[in-house]
Image: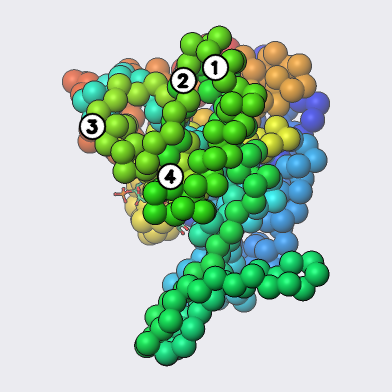
Amino acid sequence: MEKIKMTTPLVEMDGDEMTRILWKMIKDELLLPFIDLKTDYYDLGLVHRDETGDQVTVDSALATKKYGVAVKCATITPNAARVDEYNLKSMYKSPNGTIRAILDGTVFRAPIVVKGIEPTVKTWKKPITIARHAYGDVYKASEMRIPGAGKAEIVYTDEEGRETRELIHEFDGPGIVQGMHNLDRSIIAFARSCFNYALDTRQDLWFSSKDTISKTYDHTFKDLFQDLFEAEYKEKFEEAGIEYFYTLIDDAVARVIRSAGGYIWACKNYDGDVMSDMLATAFGSLAMMTSVLVAPDGTTEYEAAHGTVQRHYYKHLNGEETSTNSVATIFAWTGALRKRGSLDGIQELVDFADKLEEATIETIENGTMTKDLALITTLDKVNAVNSQDFIKAVRSRLESKL
Ligand code: NAP
Ligand code: MG
């Protein structure tokens, strides 16, 4: 078979630990034999981020803006332990945070549903997609340790130098404060991408926040969503037979558990971070969740929703066998290849992505899976395999489809 040709490069962001190992296996076994893969490669592994003072992360985001489509491997967000482990020059920010701050937009996360992996929540019949705002709030906050008694205020200084102040707290002893922000334009872009995604996929859209407590901050989100909905989307939703509704985050949580699924749940940045792990786990496994960042200008970045699977990596380094699930990372690649193919009008690439996804799902549905899934499957005959053998099993199924 002749390899599929690409015209525009895909931005490839390599990453860390076990997912970096899977990344190479996926490329070697599932992509390079079939595609004349064109990528603009950025090594976001922590060692190289440190060597470049994290410039490589910024460069990869700018390249994504240029080419329009990226695929990203999971990366370490350094904490104090990582600074020691890697002897880092600085405790770099989360690469995802840096990339999202440059691209803006919304992260859509949806479970990969396969037969034999049943959701923990019995009422769920269809996938639930989380739409996570990818800009601001606690991910771009300033924090301060308050050493002792004193007054903390929020001060806004306008361009003429006039100040507006708001008391945070009169401290009578040590404590903490946090200042965070968001932008109307980012919130509106978030709302717009959620409305568009709901129309594209013909699913209802829920949005939740805590506007009863956060009467200015969260309330602004609620109002901007409502204004945009009424101005531009109300009729389109009616025509499509879908619904938009707003509810408090605590009410949303209760409704989600009672629901049958099949809708998009838009969440603020932090809520989406937390709720997507809850949903992924309840749908079966963190490793069965896709994640795509959609920027207001249509730029997309595909990744897995899980982390670098550190515990498995240390087993791997010890020469022990691992059974790490590569499905979400495979789907990051298929998502990006499909998007690249459709932007460039390369139908073969789109078809390849579809077939690779089918091969992956069928492999599991026929009983060959990694241990995380073998533990929870309802299938009778299960062949629990290691990381490499799972990818090899997908390859043989893929070959029979091509
Ligand atoms: P994690 O890598 O998602 O792994 C947590 C646990 O979930 C694993 O120990 C494993 O459970 C299970 N798991 C996750 N993915 C799996 C897979 N593909 N196959 C099988 N099991 C899987 O989260 P973490 O250990 O909290 O974080 C490790 C590093 O990842 C951190 O440095 C963090 O900064 C980074 N991180 C990166 C991203 C990103 O780049 N998008 C997101 C989250 C975290 P068992 O150990 O029980 O098998
Ligand atoms: Mg998270």
Classify mark 2: helix, strand or loop. Answer: loop
Residue annotated with mark 2: 243
Q: Amino acid at mark 3?
A: Thr
Among numbered discs 2 and 1, the one appearing first in the sequence: 1
| Disc 1 CB within 8 Å of nearest ligand 2 atom | no
Determine the CA span between mark 2 and mark 4.
18 Å
Classify mark 4: helix, strand or loop. Answer: strand
Label 2–label 4 contact, CB within 8 A? no
Let me know if residue 346 appears in the view.
yes
Give the label on residue 319, or none.
none
* Closer to us: 8 or 315: 8
Residue annotated with mark 3: 120
Q: Amino acid at mark 2?
A: Glu
Residue annotated with mark 4: 209
Could you tell me which quadrant the N terminus lies in? top right
| Disc 4 CB within 8 Å of nearest ligand 2 atom | no
* Closer to us: 186 or 322: 186
